[in-house]
Image (cartoon, rainbow, N blue to C red):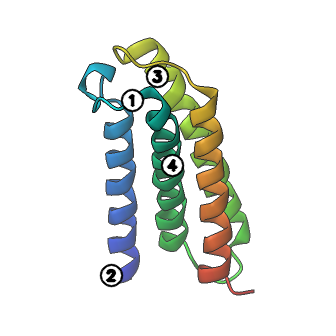
């Protein structure tokens, strides 16, 4: 039981970190040349959301819980879409970016696939 509580706490902390990073005003982001920023930004999104799905799947990894992994993945993709909407309307100098949503979804799906291999061996 202690392992499960600590993994849930870590998952919540990761979710809070991702939310904080996605809510930083655009003026406070590091200045990177636009062509480097495109690739760097997308890889950051992939990594953040891959880890997000991994830590939540690990927190709920039990035999025969494939559906919970799918639910975590779908909710994480929806969270990414929601954060893009929040960035557009509520975070100064941030915008809605379909490329970020695609990167988030790629990270989520990668996290799901890794989780299925690592935490759900059936």
Residues packed near mark 4 inside 10 Å, few (<14), some (14 to 19) or many (20 plus)? some
Q: Position of residue 3 (x, y in %)?
A: 36, 81
Q: Residue at x 64, y 62 (%)?
A: 110
* Above or below, comparing residue 112 to residue 45 in the picture: below
Q: Residue at x 48, y 16 (%)?
A: 88
Q: Secondary structure at mark 2?
A: helix
Q: Position of residue 9 (x, y in %)?
A: 33, 63
- Quadrant location of the N terminus in the rendered image: bottom left
Mark 2 — residue? Answer: 2
Q: Nearer the viewer, mark 2 or mark 4?
A: 4
Q: CA distance from mark 2 to mark 4?
A: 33 Å
Q: Position of residue 87 (x, y in %)?
A: 44, 22
Mark closest to the chain's N terminus, 1 or 3: 1
Residues packed near mark 3 inside 10 Å, few (<14), some (14 to 19) or many (20 plus)? some
Residues packed near mark 1 inside 10 Å, few (<14), some (14 to 19) or many (20 plus)? few
Mark 4 — residue? Answer: 43
Q: Position of residue 17 (x, y in %)?
A: 32, 47
* Above or below, comparing residue 60 to residue 49 in the picture: below
Mark 1 — residue? Answer: 33
Residues packed near mark 2 inside 10 Å, few (<14), some (14 to 19) or many (20 plus)? few
Q: Nearer the viewer, mark 1 or mark 4?
A: 1
Q: Residue at x 39, y 35 (%)?
A: 22
Q: Nearer the viewer, mark 3 or mark 4?
A: 4
């Amino acid at each position: 039981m202690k392992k499960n509580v600590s993994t849930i706490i870590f998952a919540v902390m990761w979710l809070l970190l991702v939310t904080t990073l996605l809510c930083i005003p655009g003026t406070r982001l590091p200045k990177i040349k636009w062509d480097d920023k495109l690739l760097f930004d997308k890889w950051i999104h992939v990594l953040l959301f891959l880890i997000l799905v991994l830590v939540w799947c690990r927190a709920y990894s039990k035999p025969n819980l494939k559906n919970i992994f799918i639910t975590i993945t779908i909710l994480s993709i929806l969270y990414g879409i929601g954060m893009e909407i929040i960035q557009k309307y509520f975070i100064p100098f941030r915008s809605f970016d379909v490329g970020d949503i695609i990167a988030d979804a790629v990270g989520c799906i990668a996290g799901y696939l890794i989780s299925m291999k690592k935490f759900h061996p059936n």
